[in-house]
Amino acid sequence: MTEYYVYEQPLNEKVRSFLRLEKLFQEYSFHLQHDSHWNNRIAIDSILQLLAYTTRTDIKLEVLKELERQHSRLERLSKRPQIDQSQLASLLNNIQKHIANLQGISGQFGQDTKNIELLSAIAQKSSVPGSICDFDLPMLRHWFTLPKEIRHQHIQKWYQPFSHLDHSVQLILDVLRQSAEATDEIAQHGFFQRSLDTNHAIQLLRISIPIDGSYFPETSAGRHRFSIRFMSNEDPALRPEQCKQDIHFKLTMCAI
């Protein structure tokens, strides 16, 4: 069975924001599972980036609007006889639960976390070129002397205000990714282009290539069409070049 690498290309700013958040959530979760000082430090950096990102934009409103939009679209499917009504009802209830959880949050995400003195000090020192050393922030060095169980509890508590956002964004992206089936396509001489139906807004492209393929896709998209160039780059010191051979790949055009 062929295994694939998947490259994703968002086609609007909303999905681009959700993918950025998903990456921060995944980064946090991975490093939380490990107890070294290095892992703790990156988990904290993920929290600080979440604080910065959610402060700049009204992400709660964007996520709520998207959950409500997906709920409305999926409700219309209940009239189709070929749909698994039990599975659809479960998904609709799940979306409604996440809407209620987000609506129950007042103010900006992570306001209590933002007031943590240690995190504020790390954020201020992070703007200085180079790594934060012990002499820059003895308070952080002291925190690393605490038992790993205590540090783990602290990090989890600081992240807690983002947990509902984490689950909601993941649900949105899961529904979007599963909204379409992959099709087999061929990029002639490494180039592929397709028009977009403006009446059926595609939100995300998923390009799957075999793991033994020595190439990667570069995607360019506008309102009316998108193109994919498959590039090879065996030496990172050199500029990538477009493949000259035909490339077989799978394409999923996600929309809901």
Image (cartoon, helix red, strand yellow):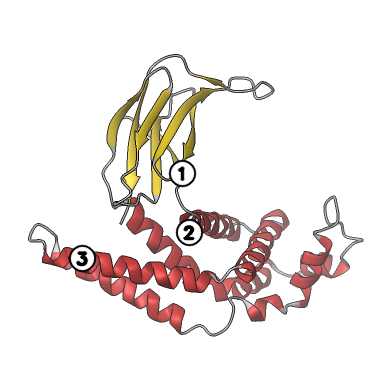
Q: Looking at the image, which residue is at 44% across and 31% down?
A: 228
Q: Is residue 82 left or right of residue 230?
A: left
- Residue under label 2, please give it: 14
Q: Looking at the image, which residue is at 57% across and 57% down?
A: 24
- Residue under label 3, please give it: 88
Q: Looking at the image, which residue is at 28% across and 39% down?
A: 182
Q: Amino acid at mark 2?
A: Lys
Label 2: few (<14), some (14–19) or many (≥20) C-alpha neighbours in 10 Å:
some
Residue 211's place in the image compared with 224, above or below, is: above
Q: Position of residue 16 (x, y in %)?
A: 50, 53
Choose between 46 and 138: the one closer to the eye. 46
Q: Is residue 223 left or right of residue 105?
A: left
Quadrant that contains the C terminus: bottom left
Quadrant that contains the N terminus: top left
First reached walking from the N terminus: tag 3 or tag 2: 2
Q: Image quadrant of residue 151?
A: bottom right
Outermost residue, left side: 81
Asked whether residue 163 is in view, the answer is no
- Residue under label 1, please give it: 9
Choose between 30 and 234: the one closer to the eye. 234
Residue 41's place in the image compared with 165, above or below, is: above
Residue 242's place in the image compared with 160, above or below, is: above
First reached walking from the N terminus: tag 3 or tag 1: 1
Q: Amino acid at mark 3?
A: Leu
Q: Position of residue 225 (x, y in %)?
A: 39, 38
Mark 3 vs 1: CB contact within 8 A? no
Q: Is residue 11 left or right of residue 249?
A: right
* Residue at mark 3 to residue at mark 1: CA–CA distance: 27 Å
